[in-house]
Amino acid sequence: MNKEELLQKINDQLIFELASGYEYKQMASEFNAMNWSGFEHFMEVQAAEEYTHAEYFRKWLEEIGYKVEYKTIEAPKAEYEKDILSIIKAALDHEKEVTRRITELYDAAIEIKFYQAYSLLQKFIDEQVEEEDTFETLVAKIERTENSNAGLSIIDGELARRQ
Ligand SMILES: [Fe+2]
């Protein structure tokens, strides 16, 4: 891989961040339909965060002199089971996929000694530690309720307060 190819892949990551936001907005919509407004709010905030990640990549690419190319964003998964745990687990899997992609980019940057890309990708590697932890903790909390509506309602209330 050369620098130009890596820049293209970073551009693709920008698109994947937008796709992540799109996916999370669909999940928020699922929660809205299920009347879990705290979970809905949580996923809307998460979606907004993905768009700030995309903007960070855009600014960096532009600063390095790369012309950003916006591409087709895949539609989110349309059919979710009407089940909180499976939706949040899908979000965790999605975050793991983001981590895998960022790590791959980092490996490539090191291989071709693209020094300027190191700190950009390191920032997102650090970010992914937090993202995976957020969803892993949430999965554990949901599992602990053993599907009791009382327990899920407490979590829903907590999530409603996410900034
Ligand atoms: Fe992200």
Image (spheres, rainbow, N blue to C red):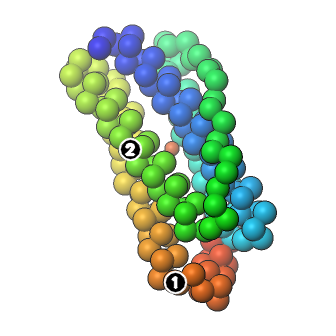
Q: Work out whether 30 lies above or below 70.
A: below
For the point 45% across and 17% down, the residue is 8
Which residue in the protein does label 1 denote? 146
Query: 129 or 153, which is in the foreground?
Result: 153
Label 2's element?
A: helix
**Quadrant showing the N terminus:** top left
Ligand 1 within 8 Å of disc 2? The answer is no
In this picture, residue 41 sits left or right of residue 94: right
- Whether residue 64 is visible: no
Numbered label attached to residue 13:
none
Disc 2 crowd, CA 10 A, few/some/many (<14, 14-19, 20+)? many
Query: 58 or 2, which is in the foreground?
Result: 2
Numbered label attached to residue 99:
2
Kindly identify the amino acid type of the residue bearing the numbered disc 2. Thr
Ligand 1 within 8 Å of disc 1? The answer is no
Which of the two discs, 2 and 1, sits closer to the camera? 1
Q: Looking at this rendering, what residue extends furthest in the bottom direction?
A: 150
Disc 1 crowd, CA 10 A, few/some/many (<14, 14-19, 20+)? few
In this picture, residue 162 sits left or right of residue 57: right
**Quadrant showing the C terminus:** bottom right
Label 1's element?
A: loop
For the point 53% across and 34% down, the residue is 16
Kindly identify the amino acid type of the residue bearing the numbered disc 1. Glu
For the point 62% across and 32% down, the residue is 74
Please tell me in which quadrant of the rendered image residue 111 appears: top left
Please tell me in which quadrant of the rendered image residue 129 appears: bottom left
